Amino acid sequence: MLEIGWFSAKLFLKGKLLRDPVYFVKQITIASSIGSLILVLLAQANIPLWLPISVSSLVTGLIMPFLLKDFKMK
């Protein structure tokens, strides 16, 4: 398993893993922005900090498959 991870990391750093890296970065940026916005908005509420972190992480994790459904690798 570590060998597969190392091989993928090497291909990624060489630029040979993703077919369309601009699409990947765009989708990751969208998901990160939504997660950050939720975190900042919920952190303003008078609730324990673990709750906004958990909610924003959960929402970001839930939207990732939808944003990356057309993601292609080489």
Image: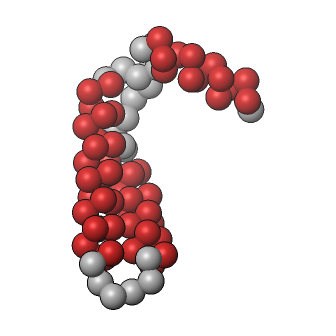
Where does residue 35 sit, x and y in percent of width and height?
33, 60
Q: Residue furthest bottom?
A: 46
Where does residue 63 sit, x and y in percent of width and height?
36, 57
Position of 15 relative to 61 (above/below): above
Position of 29 relative to 74 (above/below): below
> What's the residue at 38%, 59% (across, down)?
60
Colour approach in the figure:
secondary structure
Position of 67 relative to 58 (above/below): above
Horizontal placement of 24 versus 61: left or right? left
The C terminus: image quadrant: top left
The N terminus: image quadrant: top right
Where does residue 27 sit, x and y in percent of width and height?
29, 42
Foreground residue among 45 and 8: 45
- Can you tell which quarter of the image residue 9 is in? top right
Number of marks in the rendered image: 0
Horizontal placement of 54 versus 9: left or right? left
- Can you tell which quarter of the image residue 69 is in? top left
> What's the residue at 44%, 83% (across, down)?
48
> What's the residue at 26%, 27% (across, down)?
22
Horizontal placement of 73 versus 22: left or right? right
- Is residue 59 visible in this depiction of the protein? yes
Foreground residue among 58 and 53: 53
Where does residue 37 sit, x and y in percent of width and height?
25, 63
> What's the residue at 32%, 51% (across, down)?
32
- Is residue 62 visible in this depiction of the protein? no
Position of 33 relative to 56 (above/below): above
